Image (cartoon, rainbow, N blue to C red):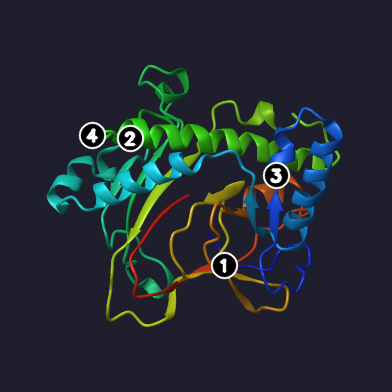
Amino acid sequence: MIARTPHRELERFTNLPIVDISPLYSPDPAARRVAARNLGAAARESGFFYVVGHGVSAATSEKLLAQTKAFFALPLATKMRWYIGNSKSHKGYVPEGEEVFYGASRDRKEAFDLGLDLPPDDVDVQRGTPMLGPNVWPDVPGFAHDVGAYYDAASNLDSKLFHGFALALSLDETYFDPFITKPSSQLRLIHYPFNAEAADTQGIGAHTDYECFTILLATGPGLEAMNGAGEWIDAPPVDGAFVVNIGDSMEIWTNGEFVATSHRVRRVSCARSDSC
């Protein structure tokens, strides 16, 4: 993840746009094109936006958050049974302080990573393709079912966004499909523990994401995006919405047409449980 100036010049936005993508699910091609035009405008002008009408049910998200909170409430010794360092495909538990970010400070968060659940005998797993392999499922009641259901729902949303982005670029709707048949996508559950001594200052430093785009289910404050004037714009949670931000890969794929926007997370005292 790197901080840099994007190819295109960002707008001086003062808040993140909200894009209703429900028409992308419509059988009407004209309706899908309208939604795609709005999606493309957000990807070009801010690279950071909310999506509503996304098709992921509130119940699915609530079950995910409940499982996330239950898992992170377990004793550290129990969570370390699924330590990510023991996985060949970068899946499992990431303890607090494991990751180092801005200023070489250890980040005060813990996480759990999973992705496309492939068997060990899959041909690409056998080849050692990075990020591909079986998930590490904690033996916590309902965890695999509820978290897996959310991953599947988010993957469906992922496909719809790719279709919308393709239309926004005046391409065939399924243009990106051949490139995402076995994606190394990652679902990351994140817990920022309560810290009464935390000051409202920079936490994770300014950076862009390396993937095509990130879909974030946020539960607390702290996220900020940089606009074209170099100003930090708050990105608070919006009920029923996901935050979507364009990543480096999509900026490269679109030759700079879509913008990977620098963003950061401030340190705040409240506890958060997010997924992206």
Q: Which residue is mark 4?
A: 141
Can residue 70 be seen here? The reply is yes
Q: Residue at x 48, y 49 (%)?
A: 276
Sequence-first tag of 4 and 2? 2
- Quick one: label 3 or label 4, which is nearer the N terminus? 3
What is the spatial separation of the Cα atoms under label 2 and label 1, in whole angstroms? 35 Å
- Label 2, secondary structure: give it: loop
Question: Position of 196 compared to 162: left or right?
Answer: left
* Residue in the foreground of this view, choosing between 221 and 158: 221
Identify whether 276 is placed above or below 115. below
Provide the residue designation for mark 1. 235
- Label 4 sits on what residue type? Pro
Of callouts 3 and 2, the N-terminal one: 3
Left/right placement of residue 126 relative to residue 163 reads left
Amino acid beneath label 1:
Ala
Residue drawn at the location 39% of the way across and 29% of the way down: 133
Q: Amino acid at mark 2?
A: Lys
The residue singled out by tag 3 in the image is 21
- Labelled disc at residue 88: 2
Q: CA distance from mark 3 to mark 2?
A: 36 Å
143 above or below 39? above
- Camera-nearest residue between 104 and 192: 192
